[in-house]
C-alpha cells in the first residue's frame, strides 16, 4: 500500500494528513512544539497512523511544508551571522537599491540588515567583471577576519565576493578554509546560493540563507532522525518557495529556497481546488498563528517571481513597493505575507494606541485562552471574547479553550489602559489585525493594478 504523509508546521499549529493508495484520508491538528518542531510532527504522525490502523513502515513518503524559516526572519530569531566580502563592499546590505516604498513619507526607515556592520568583514581581493583576477586573495586580511569571527558568538557565516559568479576561485577557497576552521558553523557561499550578477541581491540572498541555516539545519536533522526512529523509512521531501519539492538534504544546504515553503503549499492547494471547482481566478488567503498570506490565481495558475522581499512586517514581491524588506532573489510563488495572525501579541504603544504583532505568543505559552501559561493578550483571545471562535474548544476538541482567561487578559492589558469596555477593546484588536492582514491582499491586488471584484468574477 502506498501511504503518503503531508505535514505543515505553522507558528501555532502543526497539521498532519495521511492519504493511502485508495485516497482515504486522516488528519490531525496539534499545537506546534516550538522547543523542538520535529517532535510535534513525529508524535502526530505516530498517533494518526495508529488511529488509521497503519504501520509506520507502510508510509512511503513524507512531504513537508513549514514556516520555520519565514518566522525566523519575521521574528528576528535567526542565527547570529557574519559576512565576509570584498574590501569596499561592506555596506552593500545598507546601501541596497535606494528604493523608498513610500515616496513622500518622512517616517520611512529601511529594514535593519540581518548582519550588523560590526560583523561585516572586508577582505583584500578582487575579481573583475569578466572574471579576471584584479587583486589576488590576501590571506593575511582573511586570517584577520577569521580570528575576529572566532572570537564572536557567530552561528553562521555568509561569503559574497565581487563578481564571484564569473570566477568562483576566491570564494571557493575561503569556503574551504572556513569549513575546515569552523566545522560546526553554517557556511553560506554566494556561488552555491545565487551565482549571478547584482551585488545587493546576491549578498542579501546569501545572508538570508546563512541567517536561517542553523535553525533549518537543526530542525530537519531532528525531524529526519525522529521519523526514522519511528519506523518511517521513506524520504522526507520539503516544499520549496516556488511550489516544487526538494529533498531534506538539499533544503539543509540551501534553506533560502524554503522561505515561503508553507505559504507556497497553500497556493498550490488552492490551484488544485480552483481546478476542481471550475474557477480560473481566485484570491487566496491563509491566516496562521504568526503570519497571514495572500496570493492570486489567474487562469487557474499561480504566478512566480524572483523579485521578492522578506521581513520587516511584510513580505512581498512588487516592483512598485521595493525597500520594505530583505531581497531574496530566488524563484518564489508571487505572494504577500504580513506579521499578523491568531497568536499576534497585543500591546499598548507609547501613544496609548493598540499595537498588534508582529511578534507572536506561539504555541508556548500561547494565547491566554489556551490556559497553558500565556499571560499576554492576542488576536485569538479577542476573537474568543467577540464570539468569533468556539469558547470551549478548538482543533476538533484537541485544544480546550478558557474564555474567562481571554476576557481577563484583554480587560487588564487593553481595555483598562485605553479606557474602553471589554467588547470595544476586543473589537479594536480584531479590526487592527484585519487592517494589517488586508495589506497582504492589497499587495497582490490593488498595489498591482488588479481589481479584486474583477478577479473574482
Image (tube, helix red, strand yellow):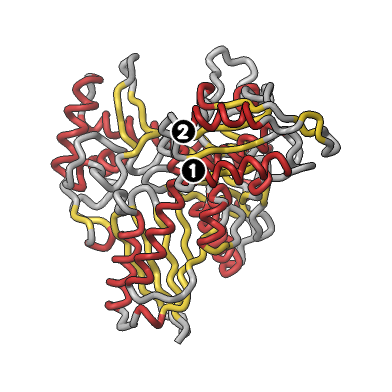
Where residue 212 appears, as percent x and y from the top left, is 48, 43
Q: Residue at x 66, y 43 (%)?
A: 173
Q: Assign a secondary structure to mark 2.
A: helix
Instruction: Write down the quadrant of residue 321 in the picture.
Output: top right
Say left or right for 11 vs 201.
left
Q: Residue at x 49, y 43 (%)?
A: 182
Residue 440 visible to the viewer: yes
Vertical order, 381 against 396 (above or below): above
Residue farthest top in this picture: 106
Vertical order, 375 against 347 (above or below): below
Say which of 269 and 456 sits in front. Answer: 269
Instruction: Write down the quadrant of residue 448 in the picture.
Output: top right
**Other-residue count near label 2 (Cα within 10 Å), few / some / many at <14 / 14–19 / ≥20:** few
Where residue 433 appears, as percent x and y from the top left, is 39, 35
Q: Earlier in the sequence, mark 2 or mark 1?
A: 2
The quadrant the N terminus occupies is bottom left
Residue farthest front in this picture: 140
Where residue 358 appears, as percent x and y from the top left, is 40, 34
In the rendered structure, are the residues bearing label 2 and label 1 in contact, judged by CB atoms less than 8 Å apart?
yes
CA–CA distance between discs 2 and 1?
8 Å
What mark, if any, has residue 255 been given in the picture? none
Say which of 308 and 294 sits in front. Answer: 308
Q: Which residue is mark 1?
A: 182
Amino acid at each position: 500500500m502506498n501511504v503518503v504523509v503531508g505535514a505543515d508546521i505553522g507558528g501555532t499549529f502543526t497539521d498532519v494528513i495521511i492519504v493511502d493508495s485508495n485516497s482515504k484520508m486522516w488528519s490531525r491538528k496539534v499545537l506546534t512544539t516550538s522547543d523542538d518542531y520535529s517532535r510535534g510532527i513525529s508524535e502526530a504522525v505516530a498517533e494518526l497512523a495508529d488511529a488509521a490502523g497503519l504501520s509506520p513502515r507502510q508510509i512511503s513518503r513524507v512531504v513537508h511544508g513549514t514556516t520555520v524559516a519565514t518566522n525566523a526572519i519575521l521574528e528576528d530569531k535567526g542565527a547570529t551571522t557574519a559576512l565576509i566580502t570584498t574590501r569596499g563592499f561592506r555596506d552593500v546590505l545598507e546601501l541596497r537599491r535606494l528604493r523608498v516604498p513610500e515616496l513622500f513619507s518622512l517616517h520611512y526607515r529601511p529594514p535593519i540588515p540581518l548582519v550588523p556592520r560590526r560583523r561585516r568583514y572586508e577582505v583584500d581581493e578582487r575579481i573583475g567583471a569578466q572574471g579576471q583576477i584584479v587583486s589576488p586573495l590576501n590571506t593575511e586580511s582573511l586570517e584577520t577576519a577569521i580570528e575576529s569571527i572566532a572570537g564572536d558568538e557567530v552561528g553562521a557565516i555568509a561569503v559574497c565576493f565581487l563578481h564571484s559568479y564569473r570566477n568562483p576561485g576566491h570564494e571557493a577557497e575561503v569556503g574551504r578554509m572556513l569549513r575546515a576552521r569552523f566545522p560546526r558553523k553554517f557556511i553560506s557561499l554566494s556561488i552555491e546560493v545565487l551565482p549571478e550578477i547584482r551585488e545587493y541581491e546576491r549578498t542579501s540572498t546569501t545572508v538570508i540563507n546563512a541567517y536561517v541555516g542553523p535553525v533549518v539545519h537543526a530542525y530537519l536533522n531532528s525531524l529526519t532522525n525522529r521519523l526514522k526512529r519511528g519506523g518511517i523509512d521513506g524520504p522526507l521531501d520539503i516544499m520549496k518557495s516556488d511550489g516544487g519539492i526538494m529533498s531534506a538534504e538539499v533544503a539543509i544546504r540551501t534553506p533560502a529556497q524554503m522561505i515561503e515553503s508553507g505559504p507556497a503549499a497553500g497556493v498550490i492547494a488552492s490551484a488544485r481546488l480552483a481546478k476542481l471547482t471550475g474557477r480560473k481566478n481566485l484570491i487566496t488567503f491563509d491566516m496562521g498563528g504568526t503570519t497571514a498570506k495572500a496570493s492570486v490565481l489567474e487562469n487557474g495558475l499561480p504566478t512566480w517571481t524572483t523579485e521578492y522581499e522578506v521581513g520587516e512586517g511584510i513580505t512581498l514581491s512588487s516592483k512598485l513597493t521595493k525597500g520594505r524588506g530583505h531581497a531574496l532573489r530566488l524563484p518564489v510563488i508571487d505572494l504577500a505575507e504580513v506579521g499578523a495572525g491568531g497568536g499576534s501579541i497585543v500591546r499598548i504603544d507609547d501613544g496609548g494606541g493598540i499595537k498588534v504583532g508582529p511578534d507572536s505568543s506561539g504555541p508556548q505559552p500561547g494565547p491566554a485562552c489556551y490556559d497553558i501559561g500565556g499571560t499576554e493578550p492576542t488576536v485569538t483571545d479577542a476573537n474568543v471574547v467577540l464570539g468569533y471562535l468556539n469558547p470551549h474548544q478548538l482543533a476538533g476538541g484537541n485544544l480546550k479553550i478558557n474564555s474567562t482567561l481571554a476576557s481577563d487578559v484583554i480587560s487588564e492589558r487593553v481595555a483598562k489602559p485605553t479606557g474602553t469596555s471589554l467588547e470595544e477593546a476586543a473589537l479594536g484588536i480584531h479590526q487592527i489585525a484585519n487592517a494589517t492582514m488586508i495589506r497582504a491582499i492589497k499587495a497582490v491586488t490593488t498595489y498591482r493594478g488588479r481589481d479584486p471584484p474583477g478577479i473574482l468574477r
